[in-house]
Amino acid sequence: MSVLPRRFKRIKSVLNRRIQDLTVLVEGVSKPHNLSAILRTCDAAGVFEANFICKKNEVKTFNSTAQGSQKWVNLNNHSSSIDAAKKLKKKGFKLFGTTLNKKSIDYRKLDFTQNTCFILGAEKWGLSDDLLAEVDECIYIPMYGMVQSLNVSVAASILLFEAIRQRDRVGLLPKNGEGIDQQKYQKTLFEWAYPEIKDSYKENNYEYPEIDENGEICK
Ligand code: SAM
C-alpha cells in the first residue's frame, strides 16, 4: 500500500514550507475550542511544532475547530512553565510573553524574523508570574474597544501572521524544506505519508525506511 501521488505531492508542498524557528507556548488555556483554534492557526501559518504546558494528569483536548491540525503540527507537552521556558531558550528561541502590563511593547515595533516563540496565557488569568519572569520581551496588541482583551486564539493568529509577514518581506519563508532540519524533515515526511504504519515501526524500534520522490517506500 502506497500513498497516492497527489496526496504525497500535497504533503511535500506543506512540509517544504514548515518553519521550525517559529512557535507558540500555551500556558493554562483550557477550553478545547481555543486550543484547537490556536493549533489550526499554527498549521495555517506553517509552524512545525507547538508547545503546551500540560500539568500531571491533564489531557489537552482538541475538538472539530482544529479540523485535524493536531495531525500536522507536532505537539510538545511540558510539565511546567519554567521547564518549558528554559528548554525553549536553550534551543535559541526568544520568548515573547503576551500581556497587557506597563512594560509591554506594541508588537508592531518588534522583529519576529528569527527564533520566535509567542507565549499565550489562560482565558481568565493570562500568563503566570513565574513564566513572565522568564520572558525576553513583553508584548501587546493594541486594542480600541470596551473589552479588555482579545480571545487568546485571535491574539495567536495576529502574532503568528505578523511573523510570517515579516519573514516574507525579507525572503525568509522556506519553500523547499529549508525551514526544518533534514532529519526531522525525513522523519515527518514518512509519518505524514504513512500514518497507519508509523506506529509499528516505533513499537519495534525500527528505523523508518526511505521513501523515493514518488512517495514509494524504498525496498
Ligand atoms: N485578564 C487576562 C490578562 O490580564 O492577561 C486576559 C487574558 S486573555 C483573554 C487570554 C490571552 O490572550 C492572554 O494571556 C494573551 O496571551 C492573549 N491576549 C489577549 N489580548 C491580547 C492583547 N491585546 N495583546 C496580546 N495578547 C493578548
Image (tube, helix red, strand yellow):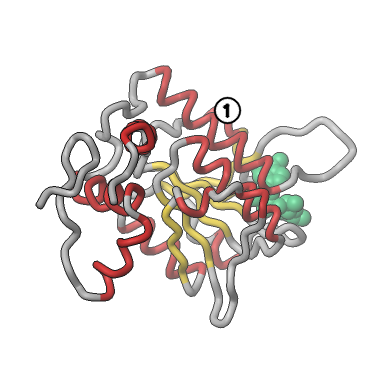
Q: Nearer the viewer, residue 136 or 31?
A: 31
Instruction: Pinpoint residue 97: horizontal percent, then vertical percent.
Output: 56, 50
Q: Is mark 1 within 8 Å of ligand 1?
A: no
- Residue 200's place in the image compared with 196, above or below, is below
Residue 62 makes an appearance in the image:
yes
The answer to whether residue 101 shows anywhere in this view is no
Query: Vertically, is 162 above or below 89?
Result: above
Q: Position of residue 55 (x, y in %)?
A: 55, 76
| Residue type, label 1 | Arg
The residue indicated by pointer 1 is 108
| Horizontal side of residue 33 vs 189, given as left or right | right
Residue 77 rendering spot, x and y as whole percentages: 46, 66
Picture residue at 42% right of the left edge, 42% below the top:
22
**Residue furthest out toward the bottom:** 57
Count of numbered badges drawn on the protein: 1
- On the picture, is 54 further left or further right than 211? right
Specify few, some or many for label 1: CA neighbours under 10 Å numbering under 14, 14-19, or 20 or more: some
Residue at the image position 51 percent from the left and 55 percent from the top: 25
Q: Residue furthest front?
A: 1
Residue at horizontal 57%, vertical 82%? 57
The quadrant in which residue 41 appears is top right
Q: Residue furthest right?
A: 146
Q: Residue furthest left?
A: 219
Q: Is residue 177 above or below residue 129?
A: above
Query: Is 93 on the left-hand or right-hand side of 31?
Result: left
**Rendered location of residue 172, percent (x, y):** 34, 25
Whether residue 72 sits left or right of residue 8 in the image: it is: right
Q: Residue at x 54, y 63 (%)?
A: 131
- The kind of secondary structure element at disc 1 is helix
Q: Which residue is nearer to you in this view: 5 or 53?
A: 5
